[in-house]
Image (tube, rainbow, N blue to C red):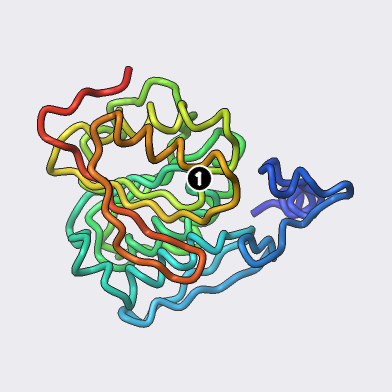
Amino acid sequence: MSGAWRGRALRRKCECEACARCDGPSSHDDETHDQRLTQAFPLRSVRATIHLHGGTTKCARVLMDWFDKGDGRRVVDFVNRDVVEVGCGTGLVGLALALLGARSVVLTDQEPVMDIVQSSIDGNVVDGTATWVSAHPLYWGDDVPDALRGKDIIVGADLIFAHENIPLLLRTFSALCTDRSQTIVFAHINRFAWEPGFFTGMASAGFRQETVLVDGDVTIFRFTRCGGAPLLS
């Protein structure tokens, strides 16, 4: 990772509405976001450690733990499956699934984040790792490239942070998950009164919702396609 990126991270002000309420510069380091530049996350079930440079969210950390030592392995059959992470940030959840036995993982986020995503991959996926891991830019609401379609599992953590992004995220989830055999795993923390609009939108788009974990203020949902459900365009 370049020194320039480290410097930008130290000065970066998060754009989510919670941090927008702050008048001065924010490191976004609180109970829901952790912007320490060097972080390590043990995966106890496989005796591995993920090393990251950059921030993580509480949702991502809870989701990682659930896959590692909770019921995640039983509830979501991710071993030897193809995974795409939406809004991956530094890639914690996707990298965890890669090290825990997924067949392939694609980490997606906006283009400016791709350098840190690739740095996360390079620092954690070594020669001999069975899982194929890659990074791909993806802007919510844009056409989803063929390389990201047809994945068995779509994961996302702490993605509802701006009201205007909800229709874009709904369109992206709808394009990524078109078959009843696919699963969306979504970790969420409540902050704003308008957030139920996302879940209403998922139902309108033809998704069945199931709560699989409540851990304090973080909830993990599983979404699957209802039979004959319409797709958003």
User: Residue 90: image x %, image y %?
Assistant: 54, 54
Establish if 26 lies above or below 161.
Answer: below
Give how far across and how far down residue 84 sits, in percent.
33, 45
> Depth check: 33 or 92 in front?
33
Residue drawn at 46 percent across, 42 percent down: 196
Q: Residues within 10 Å of mark 1 (few under 14, many from 20)?
A: some
Q: Is residue 218 above or below residue 190?
A: below
The answer to which of 93 and 204 lies nearer the viewer is 204
Q: Is residue 33 above or below residue 205?
A: below
Give percent across and percent down for residue 179. 15, 35
Quadrant location, the C terminus? top left
In percent of the image, x 17 and y 58: which residue is there?
A: 80
Q: Nearer the viewer, residue 144 or 51?
A: 144
Name the quadrant containing residue 38.
bottom right
Q: Quadrant of residue 27?
A: bottom right
Residue found 31% across the figure and 34% down from its top: 148
Q: Residue furthest right?
A: 24
Write the residue at 45% across / 64% down. 124
Q: Which residue is mark 1?
A: 159
Rendered-image quadrant of the N terminus: bottom right
In the figure, is residue 35 to the left or right of 73?
right
Question: To which quarter of the image does residue 170 belong?
Answer: top left
Q: Secondary structure at mark 1?
A: loop
Q: Is residue 53 left or right of residue 189?
A: right
Q: Across the whole image, how many numbered discs are drawn on residues?
A: 1
Looking at the image, the residue that sits furthest to the front is 193
Residue at the far top in the pictured view: 233
140 and 204: which one is in front? 204
Residue type at numbered disc 1: Leu
Q: Position of residue 8 (x, y in %)?
A: 77, 47
User: Measured along the vertical axis of the image, is residue 64 above or below residue 3?
Assistant: below
